């Protein structure tokens, strides 16, 4: 199965200068745990609910702090025409729960998450990814 057959297409991007409170509100409204960060038609990072909690709130940042201050700047992504089995293995090895999906022009077209693999995989891809993600000692961020 290809990534484009399993990914979520309903993706909202936030800008790096937006407030973390606004990013958190979008996550709440969309019931997601991560948002791609884009600037000038380019993917420049990812922000997760964990980034907001740990790098933001726990570090004493105000809700008005900018997304840029807490986001992960190193972006891991996959292509929409890649095989989900390969992506699941990579997600497990890198301990990532979600990846932005881009087309071959590197334009954002979706996100593939562990939940997408669970609901669409027929042969245990999600189990392989979850096994790797669950290993102790991971970086626990998009920039693993």
Image (cartoon, helix red, strand yellow):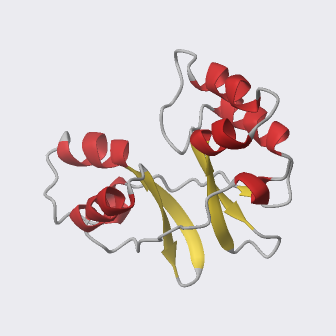
Whether residue 4 is situated above or below residue 120 in the rendered picture: below
The x, y position of residue 137, in whole percent, is: 52, 18
With respect to residue 16, does 79 lie above or below?
A: above
Seen from this angle, which residue lies furthest bottom? 40
What residue do we see at 53% from left, 45% from top? 142
Q: Nearer the viewer, residue 118 or 137?
A: 118
Q: Determine the residue positioned at 69% across, 24% down.
A: 127
Nearest to the observer: residue 65 or residue 20: 20
| Residue at left offset 19%, top offset 39% | 58
Q: Is residue 118 above or below residue 75?
A: above
Q: Quadrant of residue 25?
A: bottom left
Quadrant where the image shows the C terminus: top right
Q: Position of residue 1 (x, y in %)?
A: 86, 47
Figure label count = 0
Name the side, left or right, on which 57 lies relative to 13: left
User: Residue 118 or 90: which is nearer the viewer?
Assistant: 118
Rendering coords of residue 103 (x, y %): 77, 70
Question: How far across and down, in percent of the image, does residue 114 sit?
Answer: 60, 39
What's the residue at 62%, 25% (across, down)?
130
Compared across the picture, whether 137 is left or right of 48 comes to right
Instruction: Looking at the picture, tell me which residue is in the foreground, 54 or 5.
Output: 5
């Amino acid at each position: 199965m290809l990534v484009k057959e399993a990914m979520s297409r309903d993706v909202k991007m936030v800008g790096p200068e937006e407030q973390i409170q606004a990013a958190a509100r979008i996550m709440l409204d969309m019931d997601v745990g991560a948002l791609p960060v884009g600037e000038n038609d380019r993917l420049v990072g990812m922000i997760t609910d964990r980034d907001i909690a740990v790098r933001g709130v726990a570090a004493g940042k105000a809700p008005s702090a900018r997304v840029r201050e807490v986001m992960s700047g190193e972006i891991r992504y996959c292509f929409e025409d890649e095989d989900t089995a390969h992506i699941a293995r990579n997600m497990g090895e890198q301990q990532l729960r979600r990846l932005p999906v881009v087309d071959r022009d590197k334009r954002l077209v979706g996100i593939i998450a562990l939940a997408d693999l669970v609901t669409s995989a027929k042969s245990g891809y999600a189990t392989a990814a979850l096994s790797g993600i669950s290993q102790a000692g991971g970086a626990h961020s998009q920039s693993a």
